[in-house]
Amino acid sequence: MDDVVRIKPFRSEPAQKPTREEAEAAVRTLIAWAGDDPEREGLVDTPRRVVKAYQEFYSGYGENPNTELARVFTEAEGYADMVLVRDIPFFSHCEHHMAPFSGKAHVGYFPRDGVVGLSKLARIVDMFSRRLQTQEALTAQIAGAIEDGLRSRGVAVMIEAEHSCMSMRGVKKHGASTVTTQFTGVFRDPNERQRFLTLVSGAK
Ligand SMILES: [Zn+2]
C-alpha cells in the first residue's frame, strides 16, 4: 500500500483563521445566495456588521474556564451545602444551522475547598454558549468545567432553552422548550438531585 498517495487529513492542523476580508466576502456570498443584492445601499455595510457580531457571538473560543475559576474564596470555608445560581440568561447558536437558541441555565455545586465568586459561574455559561453548540454538549461542558476547575463534590446543571431552528424552520414549533440536565458527584444521589430541582423551580 506504499504507493497510495496519502492525502493530508483536512483536520490534521488547526485551520488557518480566515482574514476579516475573507469573512466579509463570505457574508456577501450568502446574501447573494439568499437572493438579494449585497451591493445595494441597505446591505453594503452588512458584511462588516455581521463579522463584528460574530466576534461577540463566538467570543467563547479561546477562553479558558480555569482562568475564571482560579480564584477560590476560602473564607467561606465551613460552608459545605449546595450553592445554586439559577436563571442565568444565555444565548448560543446551534451547530447544525447556526441558528440562535437561548434560555436560562441553572448551576449548582457542592464546595470542597472554598467557593468562587457567583459571577464566575455565569461567565462559564457565557464562555461555552458563545460557541457553536448543541444544548446537550453545552450542558455537559459547563458541568465538566466547574467540576474540574473547582474540584467540587458535585455539580448540577440544568438548561431550559428555545431553539429558533425548531421555531422558525423545520417543524416550526414555536414555544417548545428543551430541557437538559447533567449531574455529577453528590448530585447522583436522588435526594440531592431532587433538592436541586426543587430549588430551581422555587423561583417561579
Ligand atoms: Zn439547529
Image (cartoon, rainbow, N blue to C red):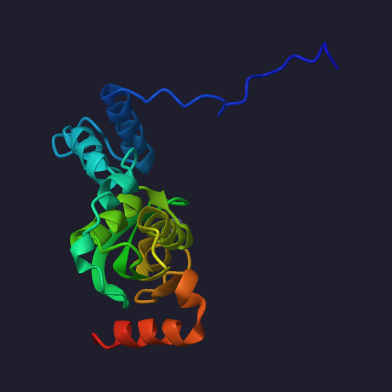
- Residue 37 visible within the image: yes
In the rendered image, the quadrant that contains the C terminus is bottom left
Q: Quadrant of residue 153?
A: bottom left
Q: Indicate the position of residue 48 as horizontal and vertical percent values.
A: 19, 33
Q: In the image, ligand 1 is in what quadrant?
A: bottom left
Q: Residue at x 41, y 62 (%)?
A: 143
Q: Is residue 108 left or right of residue 144?
A: left
Is the residue 24 above or below the residue 124 in the image?
A: above
Is the residue 122 above or below the residue 39 in the image?
A: below
Q: Indicate the position of residue 55 as horizontal and vertical percent values.
A: 24, 39
Q: Indicate the position of residue 35 as horizontal and vertical percent values.
A: 34, 41
Q: Residue furthest right?
A: 1
Q: Residue at x 36, y 37 (%)?
A: 30
Q: Quadrant of residue 73?
A: bottom left
In the rendered image, the quadrant that contains the N terminus is top right
171 or 78, which lies in front? Answer: 78
Q: Is residue 184 left or right of residue 52?
A: right
Is the residue 199 above or below the residue 16 in the image?
A: below
14 or 100, which lies in front? Answer: 14
